[in-house]
């Protein structure tokens, strides 16, 4: 043995010094390679998640797009003229309903007496102050949509009446 050191002492000294300089570079390259693989795998998972269509109930995004491909369907209602709740003004309004499909349009026609009744009651319950601003008109449109869908017994969101448009809106 060299200078009286045994094998155990030589191993202890080698461990205290750490790995040889060539081994440090190999370890560094391995760590960089592993980190790059983790980043690439994470990116691949993110791309896969973003490209996979989200489920909306039982409908995929493709089915929703197909439903939107047909031209919009509108059902124009007769002109409504009502005395407002403040009894000093009256409202004359032309309404068009945007419906989701031809079946809903036929259902609106079938239930037209009930639709007109519920709208007359709703319109005559409003005051001129409630309807004067944009917020009032928007609120009225959403109330009309809800009331008509209730008459049509449609509970699914996106079915039946999808929107309410005012073709004429006169308060006097």
Image (spheres, helix red, strand yellow):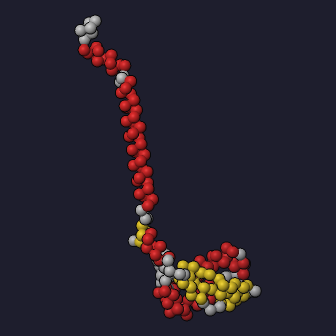
Q: Is residue 159 above or below residue 14?
A: below
Q: Residue at x 26, y 15 (%)?
A: 8
| View extreme (top): residue | 3
97 relative position to 103: left or right: right
Residue 31 is left or right of residue 114, and the answer is: left
The relative height of residue 66 versus residue 41 in the rendered view (above or below) is: below
Q: Is residue 158 left or right of residue 96?
A: left
Q: Quadrant of the N terminus?
A: top left
Quarter of the picture holding the C terminus: bottom right
Q: Is residue 121 visible?
A: no
Question: Residue 137 sits in which quadrant?
Answer: bottom right
User: How many numbered tags mark residues here?
Assistant: 0
**Viewer-proximal residue, 53 or 97?**
53
Q: Is residue 166 visible?
A: yes
Where is residue 76 drawn, in percent x and y? 59, 88
Q: Quadrant of residue 126?
A: bottom right
x, y percentage for residue 32? 41, 37
Residue under the point 47% across and 87% down: 103
- In the image, residue 157 above or below residue 120: above
x and y, in percent, of residue 128 in the image: 72, 81
Among the 4 quarters of the image, the one containing residue 30 = top left
Q: Residue at x 36, y 23 (%)?
A: 20
Q: Nearer the viewer, residue 113 or 37?
A: 37
x, y percent for residue 68: 50, 76
């Amino acid at each position: 043995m060299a200078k009286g050191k045994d094998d155990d002492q030589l191993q202890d000294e080698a461990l205290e010094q750490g790995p040889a300089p060539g081994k440090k570079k190999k370890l560094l390259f391995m760590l960089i390679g592993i980190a790059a693989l983790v980043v690439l795998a994470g990116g691949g998972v993110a791309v896969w998640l973003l490209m996979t269509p989200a489920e909306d109930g039982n409908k995929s995004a493709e089915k929703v797009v197909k439903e939107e491909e047909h031209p919009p369907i509108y059902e124009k209602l007769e002109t409504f003229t009502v005395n407002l709740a403040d009894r000093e003004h009256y409202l004359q309004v032309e309404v068009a309903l945007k419906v989701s499909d031809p079946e809903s349009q036929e259902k609106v026609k079938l239930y037209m007496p009930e639709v007109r009744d519920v709208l007359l009651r709703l319109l005559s319950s409003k005051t001129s102050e409630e309807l004067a601003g944009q917020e009032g008109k928007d609120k009225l449109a959403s109330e009309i949509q809800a009331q008509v869908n209730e008459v049509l017994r449609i509970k699914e969101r996106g079915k039946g009446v999808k929107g309410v448009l005012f073709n004429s809106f006169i308060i006097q």
